[in-house]
Image: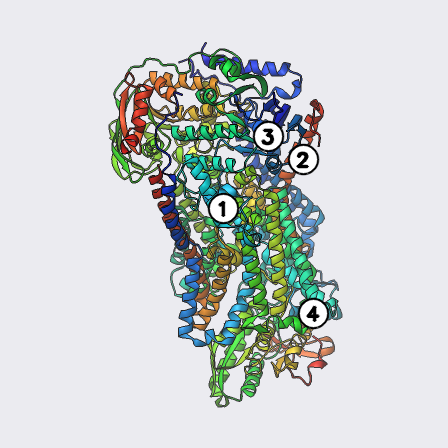
């Protein structure tokens, strides 16, 4: 029995162990409290003042595109920065997610709200997901300008649209009808399934095809989504060819989609046999127009979009417009613009690009 | 006195002999003494504590260096941003401690979100919608758990499969649509703050979940079993731990909490879509590993993981406020992740090298020659 | 005296604060079988690993064929003609048997690529030489430990090593296989190779070796010519003192039936297993490795399921395949593999010691940290576990102390029945006798014990009753008085002989 | 000799037993080849799709199938090298992106640069990135999952930082370079031939050379490999390096095949690549699986999307079906494993 010895108490290692755990929790609590209280005391002096908005000439503007590092976006933002400078903003910022997803823009809006930015210009990835954040920004005094892709109208002051949505849709339908000789199967290769602008155009296209007797022999067989991703769009285009052997034409109302589709067509046996049109950047489409894959496509000048958005923001921040129908504001060298129905500002008509004129454009 | 005490005496004797030998300074620990820190050093230098210091230091730095960071508004926005990661990281900690992994969490969140949208659109009562969505998460987790614990497949492979499957089902359920018209009272609740503190109201729920998993892991028989299980499945079996049952419920746990994260996501952004929370799985795992959980299992704690999540979240928000590109965030996250695992190895290697050098110098050099 | 094939003098190796080897000295001559003995922790394995090129010694002189060497890695050691068979087989489960033998030096065929045919043939030749029927094309996964060890031996032979080191190669082998191994070793000796043989089994050491080197506490003690020394002398040198009887037998009152196993069967593993264990009784389960002893014990405890029969404990039928039910009922199981099954090596001593108690330490589902600490301290103190702190990882303890932690965690549950599977495997003599005394002590307190052991003296010394298994069946039940080496061995091999 | 049981069991029956067994297991080993299920699945998929839509196997259809699979094949082969050693490389998508952008940059900034130089440079950059992974994994002895999750972020970040909004388009690259993924030899696009060469070369290495077999040994039991004197660190490092080179090659080919290369090229590819290897029968915890299997897995995964499109299956079902396929692959593998284990146990029982 001696082997199993009587136990004698010693040490208090267990207490130390418990203490360690308590210390861990305590440290977390402390760090949180530091954010919440200790540091927050400084908020009154540094943070609070700015959020109320500096009324003088010290206005700030921030552009939040759908995603950074996208060539189309770069052109738009280039125009935006130019516009912001001309309009007299003291500070211009460009922030945004690296991937275009619905929710990724929210925390950027939040940060801008907190930064007390006066004008937020946004191209929404999802019309509703950004809503609550934009409302918070507005209640903190910011003016919201949507551009390129609209938010739900209740969350913004004005929407700077490329063109009348219906107009851009009709042009594309007309182009494809000409290119396929007015009869045959066509398909649409869009960006993301939730993109507001895309869906609106597609809706108008469908209506036009159904109602206009000129297009009665054209059949829209499907709409696919390339998610504005080069690889995905490429493979969607390829899939279309296989699934619909009688396909005569494709409309791709997105710059990424049309370029990827053009690349696929130009490297396949379908080159010259299947027509392609839509909205594209001349710089990206130049080789495909020259090699005959694409005969004609359209786009507005994206730079103007950003440019007008900046001036609209300035006018809103200055209080010269409220975003009501009929308001007008001066948009630098582009002259006067009017706010239309639903707070929409139209920038201008799209340009149609062909082999003859494409070299005149550089964007 | 018995033989056993004699053994002890013999051991002591052996030690004494060794101590009397020439290389006295290094031989005295020959048989029994282990290594490790005790007491205060253990608390203050532990992995958890270091993570927490890192969070505190960074918060202080951000308060000073980044204008407007020190504000209750920060607390609100920051927490709203980290909640999904924080939520999923909690059960993920338990899963990784048992040596498994769940890559399908973000897809489950997406599936839940899609389902919410469709059910709500179909006109169901919001309460029913929430319950059914949660049930979907539980089922998705149970499906993972079944394949891993019952069929016995490797979790890494299974959850790569269900990552695609659940996201695919989300697409099947809701397709291209986005449902946005959730009741404003509810979506409002999910972005509201607790008075002037800036702390989001939903944090109450998150704290409850965190406490649940913290207590479960650190203070219950089940949690004790998980650590044992993570180190050695066989040894755990021998003390009566029901290995497969534990794993099954853990995957149900990640499924359920992922569903909560999916619901949160949907209501916070008032948008139910199939691609919600996509790609979140790697962020969660990065945060958990940064929080000191060993990918091999057996090591890690909830406080450490919370600190890991907060560190990434805080850096993220500070960069946003400083209008520094996400590019920096990506690189910082990756570097932190690698540094957090490489640093201890390098430190240990350095200590060993120093020790070896010291020992070599202190011992008589008979050889080796090349 | 011819020139030594290999000589190591005064080698030292430290790991952090732990000195694993203070003076490693060994000399192997051509054509000799040299035994190395010592308690666990004496530094034998460290010395082997230095010879194998796995560890770099901090100090010491090392020569191979009179040339000074410093191995950077295992490949260097191999190149110098040293080949090692480790205690635990180290096969690659996904590779074929043939590939396991020839990995890294597969025979080449056309275009300098590996020729599977030549490799297969070479493996067949080796197995023919060893007289074992193993299919060279099957994958190694699922092979019995004995077969794995044989493949290790084939591998070592095929290397044509000048020096062959065998670190406890016989631990898992049956008598036939041991004998065959010895034949191979002797034939290699005839061919002029030097063999270093490490074993805890003195009968083997004395049967095989030409010389014996003794180590203690990381230091060289002495080298003897085998013919000139006795077991007692060697043991004295190993332990540094006299030790009492190895297998103490104390009388205990045999009480009521605690465990009743009725007609237990599992397809392909064991059939028709029926036996009883009574309070205060030590029942040994003997037999060759692979006879199904551990499998029966695992099924009884609920680790593995069984197909037929029943297990009753204290009169109640025990739930099948549920270790927790067995533990709750009052069973404990000290498994054979301490490091993989008995302990969670990276957890602290305290956590390991209380792992079995985790449910009873909890109130309202929450474990009381104080109670946990007290329980750990109590039981590690009772079993005299030597550790710097309860919070150290159990892996920092010596083998004997680790086994004490395993025992502590089961004794903490105050079991009525304890299964001990190879309780003294790989444990030094000092702790071994301590373990025996402890088991005997437990029996005296009325605990029923089922002991699985491959060491016949241990079985005969400890058991009140011996059950002998062969090929999944119980072939004999022998009372203490009837159990002799002959009767046990006969039952363990009887049906085998009968079949021929 | 008291404690070791000795018997007089006669030994020489060895050879007679060995022969019939080995014949049987040779047959068995063919059946349990891990590549069989995936190959059967691929053939079935192609045939069914062809029956429903003959265009699927038209000249352009086949070409597209092969082109789609090419990049994934190369990545899956590289990943197999790493997974077989019980490691994983999650950074391949990021490596591919960086190299693809690097390729675009080279063509844009060094007009007239020979294509072969671009290939070499791209693979060299891949080698460097793979070597970083390999070094961190082997020197710091840290799990590859963590390291390559870290480098996944870092390499992607570097790609973003370097590229910004810049993208290079097909137009920026010489026509001959783009032609690699257009021109065919015997119906095979040139870049697919490159991929096939890669598969053959790596397969021969893995099956027929000692270092190749070492990789299996390492994945089967790393500790045993260390004990046995296999230079584990060096082999694992080389596996990561080779994977980097192959990801680099895939990056160059990506630039040849697709229109634009920029900051986000290759995002999210890593799990697809791992899935391809797993579907192809490569065990996720190392030790077994073949390069050919992984390549077929890659073809299956890339083909299924086209097949479903060609079958006009609702596009929303596609991803779910891919998920089911991955799960089916591992379940089948597991079932085969159980069957093999039972067979082995039975043969073992006879041995006793």
Characterize the local packing of mark 1: few (<14), some (14-19) or many (20 or more) Cα atoms within 10 angstroms.
Answer: many
Whether callout 4 and callout 2 share a subunit is answered no
Q: Is residue A124 visible?
A: no
Say which quadrant the N terminus of chain C sits in.
Answer: top right
Report the residue marked by disc 3. C51
Report the residue marked by disc 1. C119
Q: Is residue A254 left or right of residue C88?
A: right
Badge nearest the viewer, 3 or 2: 3
CA distance separating discs 1 and 2 = 44 Å
Characterize the local packing of mark 4: few (<14), some (14-19) or many (20 or more) Cα atoms within 10 angstroms.
Answer: many
Badge nearest the viewer, 3 or 1: 1
Above or below for B94 versus A15: below
Q: Give the residue furthest to the bottom.
A: A214
Position of residue B21 measured from the top left corner of the image (x, y, whole percent): 64, 15
CA distance separating discs 3 and 1 = 28 Å
Secondary structure, mark 3, is helix
Report the residue marked by disc 4. A80
- Please report contact status of discs 1 and 2: CB closer than 8 Å, yes or no: no
CA distance separating discs 4 and 1 = 72 Å
Q: Is residue B64 left or right of residue A243?
A: right
Q: Nearer the viewer, residue C109 or A147?
A: C109
CA distance separating discs 3 and 2 = 25 Å
Badge nearest the viewer, 1 or 2: 1
Q: Nearer the viewer, residue C150 or A235?
A: C150
Whether callout 1 and callout 2 share a subunit is answered no
Report the residue marked by disc 2. B350
CA distance separating discs 4 and 3 = 73 Å
């Amino acid at each position: 029995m001696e082997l199993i010895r009587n136990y004698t108490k010693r040490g208090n290692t267990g207490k130390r162990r418990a203490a360690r755990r308590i210390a861990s929790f305590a440290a977390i609590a402390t760090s949180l409290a530091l954010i919440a209280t200790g540091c927050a005391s400084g908020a009154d002096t540094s943070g609070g003042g700015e959020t109320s908005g500096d009324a003088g000439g010290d206005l700030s503007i921030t552009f939040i595109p759908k995603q950074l590092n996208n060539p189309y976006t770069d052109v738009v933002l280039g125009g935006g920065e130019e516009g912001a400078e001309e309009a007299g903003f003291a500070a211009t910022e460009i922030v945004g997610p690296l991937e275009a997803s619905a929710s990724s823009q929210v925390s950027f809006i939040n940060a801008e709200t907190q930064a007390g930015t006066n004008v937020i210009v946004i191209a929404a990835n999802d019309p509703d997901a950004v809503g609550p954040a934009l409302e918070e920004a507005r209640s903190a005094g910011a003016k919201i300008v949507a551009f390129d892709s609209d938010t739900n109208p209740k969350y913004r002051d004005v929407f700077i649209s490329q063109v009348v949505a219906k107009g851009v849709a009709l042009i594309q339908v007309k182009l494809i009808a000409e290119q396929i000789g007015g009869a045959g199967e066509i398909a649409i290769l869009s960006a993301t399934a939730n993109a507001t602008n895309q869906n609106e155009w597609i809706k108008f296209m469908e209506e036009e095809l159904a109602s206009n007797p000129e297009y009665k022999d054209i059949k829209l067989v499907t709409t696919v989504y390339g998610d504005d991703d080069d690889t995905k769009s490429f493979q969607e285009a390829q899939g279309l060819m296989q699934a619909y052997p009688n396909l005569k034409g494709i409309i791709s109302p997105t710059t990424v989609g049309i370029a990827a589709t053009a690349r696929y067509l130009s490297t396949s046996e379908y080159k010259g046999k299947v027509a392609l049109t839509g909205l594209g950047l001349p710089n990206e489409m130049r080789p495909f127009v020259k090699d005959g894959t694409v005969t004609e496509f359209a786009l507005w000048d994206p730079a103007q979009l950003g440019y007008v958005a900046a001036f609209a923001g300035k006018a809103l921040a200055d209080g010269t417009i409220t975003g009501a129908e009929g308001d007008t504001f001066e948009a630098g060298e582009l002259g006067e613009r009017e706010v239309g129905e639903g707070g929409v500002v139209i920038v201008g008509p799209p340009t149609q690009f062909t082999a003859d004129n494409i070299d005149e454009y550089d964007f | 006195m018995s033989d056993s005490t004699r053994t002890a005496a013999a051991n002591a004797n052996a030690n004494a002999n060794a101590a009397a030998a020439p290389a006295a300074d290094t031989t005295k620990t020959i048989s029994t003494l282990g290594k490790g820190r005790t007491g205060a050093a253990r608390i203050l230098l532990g992995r958890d504590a270091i993570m927490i210091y890192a969070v505190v230091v960074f918060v202080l730095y951000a308060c000073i260096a980044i204008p407007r960071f020190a504000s209750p508004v920060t607390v609100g926005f920051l927490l709203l941003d980290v909640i999904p990661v924080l939520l999923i990281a909690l059960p993920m900690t338990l899963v990784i401690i048992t040596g498994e992994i769940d890559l399908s969490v973000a897809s489950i969140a997406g599936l839940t979100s899609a389902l919410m949208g469709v059910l709500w659109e179909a006109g169901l009562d919001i309460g029913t919608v929430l319950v059914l969505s949660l049930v979907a998460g539980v089922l998705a987790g149970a499906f993972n758990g079944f394949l891993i614990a019952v069929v016995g497949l490797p979790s890494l492979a299974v959850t790569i499969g269900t990552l695609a499957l659940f996201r695919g089902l989300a697409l099947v359920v809701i397709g291209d649509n986005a449902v946005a018209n959730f009741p404003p009272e509810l979506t409002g609740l999910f972005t509201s703050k607790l008075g002037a503190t800036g702390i989001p109201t939903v944090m109450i729920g998150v704290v409850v979940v965190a406490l649940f998993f913290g207590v479960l892991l650190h203070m219950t028989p089940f949690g004790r079993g998980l650590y044992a299980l993570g180190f050695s499945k066989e040894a755990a079996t021998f003390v009566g731990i029901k290995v497969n049952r534990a794993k099954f419920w853990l995957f149900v746990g990640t499924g359920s909490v992922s569903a909560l994260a999916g619901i949160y996501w949907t209501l916070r952004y008032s948008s139910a879509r199939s691609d919600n929370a996509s790609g979140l799985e790697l962020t969660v795992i990065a945060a958990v590993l940064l929080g000191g959980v060993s990918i091999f299992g057996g090591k890690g704690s909830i406080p450490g993981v919370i600190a890991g999540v907060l560190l990434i979240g805080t850096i993220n928000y500070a960069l946003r406020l400083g209008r520094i590109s996400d590019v920096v965030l990506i690189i910082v996250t990756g570097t932190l992740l690698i540094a957090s695992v490489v640093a201890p190895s390098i430190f240990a290697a350095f200590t060993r090298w120093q020790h070896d050098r010291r020992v070599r110098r202190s011992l008589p050099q008979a050889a080796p020659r090349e | 005296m011819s020139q030594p094939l290999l000589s190591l003098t005064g080698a030292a190796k430290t790991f952090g604060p732990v000195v694993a080897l203070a003076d490693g000295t060994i000399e192997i001559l051509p054509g000799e079988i040299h035994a190395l003995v010592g308690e666990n922790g004496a530094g034998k394995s460290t010395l082997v690993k230095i010879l194998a090129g796995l560890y770099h010694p901090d100090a010491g002189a090392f020569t191979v064929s009179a040339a000074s060497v410093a191995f950077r890695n295992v490949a260097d050691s191999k190149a110098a003609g040293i080949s090692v068979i480790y205690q635990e087989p180290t096969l690659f489960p996904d590779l074929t048997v043939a590939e396991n033998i020839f990995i890294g030096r597969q025979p080449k065929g056309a275009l300098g690529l590996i020729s599977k045919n030549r490799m297969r043939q070479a493996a067949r030749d080796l197995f023919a030489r060893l007289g074992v029927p193993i299919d060279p094309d099957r994958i190694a996964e699922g092979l019995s430990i004995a077969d794995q060890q044989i493949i290790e031996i084939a591998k070592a032979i095929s290397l044509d090593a000048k020096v062959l080191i065998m670190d406890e190669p016989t631990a898992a082998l049956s008598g036939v296989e041991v004998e065959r191994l010895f034949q191979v070793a002797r034939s290699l000796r005839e061919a002029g190779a030097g063999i270093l043989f490490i074993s805890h089994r003195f009968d083997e050491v004395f049967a095989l070796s030409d010389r014996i080197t003794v180590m203690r506490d990381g230091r060289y003690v002495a080298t003897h010519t085998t013919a000139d020394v006795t077991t007692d002398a060697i043991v004295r040198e190993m332990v540094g003192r006299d030790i009492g009887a190895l297998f103490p037998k104390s009388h205990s009152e045999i009480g009521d039936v605690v465990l009743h196993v009725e007609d237990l069967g599992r397809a392909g593993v064991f059939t028709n297993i029926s036996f009883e264990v009574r309070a205060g009784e030590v029942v040994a389960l003997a037999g060759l490795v692979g006879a199904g002893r551990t499998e029966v014990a695992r099924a009884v405890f609920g680790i593995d399921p069984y197909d037929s029969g029943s297990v009753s404990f204290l009169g109640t039928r025990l739930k099948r395949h549920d270790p927790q039910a067995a533990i709750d009922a009052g069973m404990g199981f000290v498994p054979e593999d301490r490091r993989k099954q008995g302990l969670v090596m990276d957890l602290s001593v305290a956590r390991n010691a209380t792992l079995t108690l985790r449910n009873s330490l909890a109130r309202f589902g929450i474990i009381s940290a104080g109670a946990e600490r007290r329980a750990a301290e109590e039981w590690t103190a009772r079993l005299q576990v030597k550790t710097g702190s309860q919070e150290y990882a159990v892996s920092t303890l010596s083998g004997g102390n680790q086994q004490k932690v395993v025992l502590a965690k089961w004794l903490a549950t105050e079991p009525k029945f304890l299964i001990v599977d190879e309780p003294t495997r790989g444990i030094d003599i000092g702790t071994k006798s301590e373990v025996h005394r402890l088991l005997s002590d437990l029996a005296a307190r009325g605990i029923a014990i089922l002991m699985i052991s491959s060491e016949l003296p241990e079985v005969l010394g400890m058991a009140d009753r011996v059950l002998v298994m062969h090929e999944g069946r119980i072939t004999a039940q022998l009372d203490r008085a009837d159990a002799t080496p002959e009767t046990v061995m006969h039952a363990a091999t009887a049906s085998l002989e009968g079949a021929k | 000799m008291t404690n070791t049981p000795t018997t007089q069991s006669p030994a020489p029956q060895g050879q007679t037993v060995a022969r019939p067994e080995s014949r049987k297991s040779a047959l068995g080993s063919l059946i349990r080849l891990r590549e069989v299920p995936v190959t059967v699945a691929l053939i079935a998929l192609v045939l069914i799709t062809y029956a429903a839509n003959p265009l699927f196997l038209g000249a352009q259809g086949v070409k597209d199938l092969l082109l789609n699979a090419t990049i994934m094949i190369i990545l899956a082969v590289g990943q197999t090298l790493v997974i077989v050693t019980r490691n994983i490389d999650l950074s391949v998508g990021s490596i591919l992106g960086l190299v693809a952008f690097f390729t675009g940059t080279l063509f844009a900034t060094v007009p007239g640069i020979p294509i072969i130089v671009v290939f070499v440079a791209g693979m060299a950059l891949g080698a460097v990135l793979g070597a970083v992974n390999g070094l961190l994994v082997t020197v710091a002895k840290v799990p590859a999952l963590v390291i390559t999750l870290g480098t996944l972020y870092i390499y992607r970040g570097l790609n973003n930082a370097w590229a910004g909004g810049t993208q290079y388009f097909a137009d920026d690259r010489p026509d001959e370079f783009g032609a690699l993924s257009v021109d065919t030899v015997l119906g095979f696009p040139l870049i697919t031939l490159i991929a096939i060469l890669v598969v053959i070369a790596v397969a021969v290495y893995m099956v027929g050379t000692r270092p190749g077999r070492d990789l299996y040994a390492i994945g089967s039991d790393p500790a045993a490999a260390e004990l046995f004197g296999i230079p584990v660190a060096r082999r694992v490092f080389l596996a990561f390096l080779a994977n980097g080179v192959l990801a680099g090659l895939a990056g160059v080919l990506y630039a040849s095949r697709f229109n634009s290369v920029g900051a986000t090229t290759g995002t999210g590819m890593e799990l697809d690549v791992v899935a391809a290897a797993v579907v192809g029968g490569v065990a996720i915890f190392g030790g077994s699986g073949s390069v050919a299997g992984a390549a077929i897995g890659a073809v299956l995964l890339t083909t299924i999307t086209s097949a479903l499109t060609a079958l006009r299956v609702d596009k929303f079902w596609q991803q779910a079906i891919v998920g089911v396929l991955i799960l089916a692959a591992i379940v089948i593998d597991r079932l085969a494993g159980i069957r093999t284990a039972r067979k082995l146990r039975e043969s073992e029982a006879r041995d006793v």
